[in-house]
Amino acid sequence: MVSIGIIAWNEEAGIGAMLESVFRQTLFAELVRRGKHCEILCVTNGCTDRTPEVVAEIFSRQSREHPDAANFSCRVINVTQRGKINAWNQFVHAFSARDAKYLFLMDADISIHPRETLWNMVETLEKNREASVSVDLPCKDIASKKRKTFWDRVSLGASQMTSSASAQLCGQLYCIRSEVARNIYLPRDLCACDDGFIKALVCTDSLTHQVWPWRIVAAPNAAHTFEAYVSPKGVLKNQKRQMIGQTIVHLLIDTHLNKLSHSQRLQLADTISHKEKADPDWLKRLISQHIRRTRFWWRLYPGLLSHRFQRLKSLGGFKRIACLPAALAGFFLALVSSFLAYRSLKKGATDYWPRAERAGLKDFELKRAGSDA
């Protein structure tokens, strides 16, 4: 059985197109042929618009009209507490079916393509027993623009450098073995970079050995599109969020959880969950202590300024030249955003989720729908 978890916050305007891209997937027909069942759960969290109602209407229509409706079930679960972290924990540990073999986690503001994407991700895990997570190719909507601005090219260059590293996990869409997911519990103050935290635990089997990058495998012919930040203000806000998240991941993985006993790491989800209940502010104290020890804001975590140039070195000659402007722009952007992140963390603020514009992705969906017609 496959369980799909869609995490949504105030996506009334765009979630319809996203869900249509889900229901166009061949996954459902493939499961029917194998006599398997699928559930689709949309976990709406802290919504103040009509997202739950819109999703419920679409689920009701698809349950009546979809050719494979007999083999899937749909449900909207409205969580009053806002936040992806809590929604992730609730889906993995409470809402998803206990007999599900694979769990999909996906954001509600993406578009999935090609139609074989989800099935290829499942099949990748079926064929590769050593892999714990299958991923697709994240595509920025601006990649299809004919006339790209300077900031578009910088953004795309940064993506090229990111994709050059091994074991990449994009939190917007991935498929994970249920037994692996259920030994992960996201601390409530993790903020951004939940994917960085999950990646670290997946590639080390909950910190029980060195990094094994082959635990994360890219599925063939699988991709999704998301809207890129391209305005200087939007990019800066997103980078600030990433800096906060990566600082917290560094504290958890490199300085705290790796000191747990082997038995505690084997039961890491229970360990963290119990710690949260017994001491809700434990992570905030770790962050506060780290900020007091950190003299300069560009030293929030190792490699904050240098990792872009390390990625640049791994590229071939032409790509290295093409991505140099992105690396230089990223360096100066990191200086500014790390200062903003440092200032926020010093005030004890970790819940920072800037809202992205959605018009660009709507335009992309309209163009793609026209080309498919």
Image (cartoon, rainbow, N blue to C red):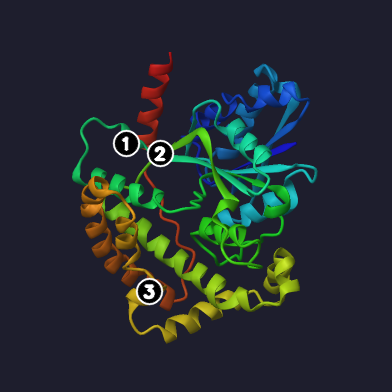
Whole-number angstrom distance, CA of label 1 to CA of label 2: 7 Å
| Amino acid at circle 2 | Cys
Q: Position of residue 274 (x, y in %)?
A: 73, 71
Q: Which residue is depicted at the point 45% across and 57% down?
A: 353
Q: How many marks?
A: 3
The circle on residue 143 is 1
Whole-number angstrom distance, CA of label 2 to CA of label 3: 30 Å
Along the line of sight, the residue nearer the viewer: 345 or 159? 159
Instruction: Name the N-terminal-most of marks 3 and 1.
Output: 1
Q: Is residue 124 visible?
A: yes
The residue that mark 2 highlights is 139
* Quadrant of image for the C terminus: top left
The circle on residue 342 is 3
Q: Is residue 82 visible?
A: no
Is 105 situated left or right of 344 in this image?
right
Q: Tell me whether the residue at label 1 lies in contact with that at label 2, contact meaning CB atoms closer than 8 angstroms.
A: yes
Whole-number angstrom distance, CA of label 3 to CA of label 1: 32 Å
Along the line of sight, the residue nearer the viewer: 61 or 268? 268
Instruction: Name the N-terminal-most of marks 2 and 3.
Output: 2
